[in-house]
Amino acid sequence: MSGLANLLRALVVDPRSRRALDETLLDATEEIAHTSGVGAQCWAAARAGVALGRVGLGSFGRELQHLHATSVVIVLLATFSVPVVVTATVWPAITPSSGSRATLFALLTIGPIAAFFPVSAFVVGIAAARLRASLLGLTVVLVVVEVALVGWLMPEANQQFKQRIYSVGRTATMPLEIRRGVNELPLQQLVRASRVPEASRARQQLYVRMTLCAATMWFVGLGYGAMRLSPRARILWASAAVLTIVAIGYFRLGGFTLLVAFGLALTLAIVRAHRDPVTA
Amino acid sequence: MRLAKSESVILTLLAARADAYGLELVEASRGRLKRGGIYVTLGRMEEKGLVSSRAGDNGRRLYKPTALGERALLAARIFAGQVPIKHLT
């Protein structure tokens, strides 16, 4: 349990949260140790899990107070810098000369932001370790933002972008509104569409979005875990981890389960092997 | 000093025993205290000076009420009409 305990301890920075977590973990260890029988131990472990979940939920408000201004700036920079550059690179090739160019640019940037978000989360994880900011607070905020991005903001931005481009060349006989494709479906509609037996594109799109949300969570942990290694090991581990997860998560979409399992195992391994944080 | 409901329950339970672990208080409370929340409450009460703690077995902490905690509980009971006011001396 020590690996899991270390990982959980790494998540919180608020003294009250950490104390609550430590004492709940000690209670769980004590209770499981004094319980005989596999069934009773499983029951004790389940109750400990519920108690830890409750500690996490109760700690969230306090953890938010430990999001330093610097870490928020890094979040914003990491989130917006590369997507804006990517959008600016492809911008001249795909936009018409007419229309509100600033609005089109903003709409076009949402997709790269959502796609790049897990990598931004990796940078944020590194910053959290450096600044001793709350990992739990950052992770929850980033995952919620990514769910909102891939679930609703990105599809709506895609649709608006398509609609504006379509309107430029639209004639009187053409329909007023362009139909939504799978990239433009909000999450609830995409879930419904993916249940149809023939809807392989909708299922794949749903899978991509789920992968992005899961990757965001694990990349924060990986960034944080990487900072707990020695500098040389840090570069090797982080590079290998990022490359592998990017390869599995982005290019082999069937690896969603692998992505989650690998990310969890790697984060646990890193935290377990290096319990003392690197303060440099 | 105003006591929250959970603080009042903890002080009542602690008043009836010498020292207690957090988990013992949860079990004795019959559902009024939750495992995930009790240590945040105990930490807050320790900061207020209502309880004190010392290291017990395996790193777990044993809690007991301070004199201030006992008086705060008594005052809360008097305020609630559970104890006559003459006891507050």
Image: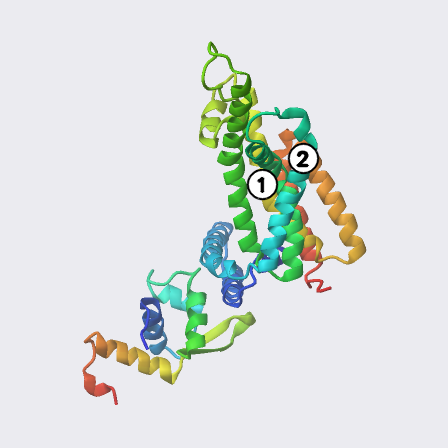
Image quadrant in which you'd find residue A251: top right
Q: Is residue A90 above or below residue A3?
A: above
- Dot 1 corresponds to which residue? A214
Q: Residue at x 59, y 45 (%)?
A: A217
Kindly give the residue lying farthest to the bottom in the view shown.
Answer: B89
Amino acid type of the residue tagged 2 in the rendering = Ala
Chain name for mark 1:
A
Q: Position of residue B2 (x, y in %)?
A: 31, 74
The label nearer to you, 1 versus 2, is: 2
- Dot 2 corresponds to which residue? A88
Q: Is residue A54 above or below residue B12?
A: above
Q: Nearer the viewer, residue A30 or A177?
A: A177
Mark 1 is surrounded, within 10 Å at the Cα level, by few (under 14), some (14 to 19) or many (20 or more) other residues, namely many
Q: Position of residue A238 (x, y in %)?
A: 73, 48
Q: Is residue A258 visible?
A: yes
Q: Residue at x 68, y 61 (%)?
A: A275
Q: Is residue B4 above or below residue A28?
A: below
Q: Are marks 1 and 2 in contact (CB under 8 Å)?
A: no
Chain name for mark 2:
A
Amino acid type of the residue tagged 1 in the rendering = Ala
In which quadrant is the N terminus of chain B drawn?
Answer: bottom left
Kindly give the residue lying farthest to the right in the view shown.
Answer: A232
Q: Nearer the viewer, residue B64 or A82?
A: A82
* Total numbered labels: 2
Kindly give the residue lying farthest to the top in the view shown.
Answer: A173
Name the secondary structure under disc 2: helix
Q: Residue at x 56, y 23 (%)?
A: A165
Mark 2 is surrounded, within 10 Å at the Cα level, by few (under 14), some (14 to 19) or many (20 or more) other residues, namely some
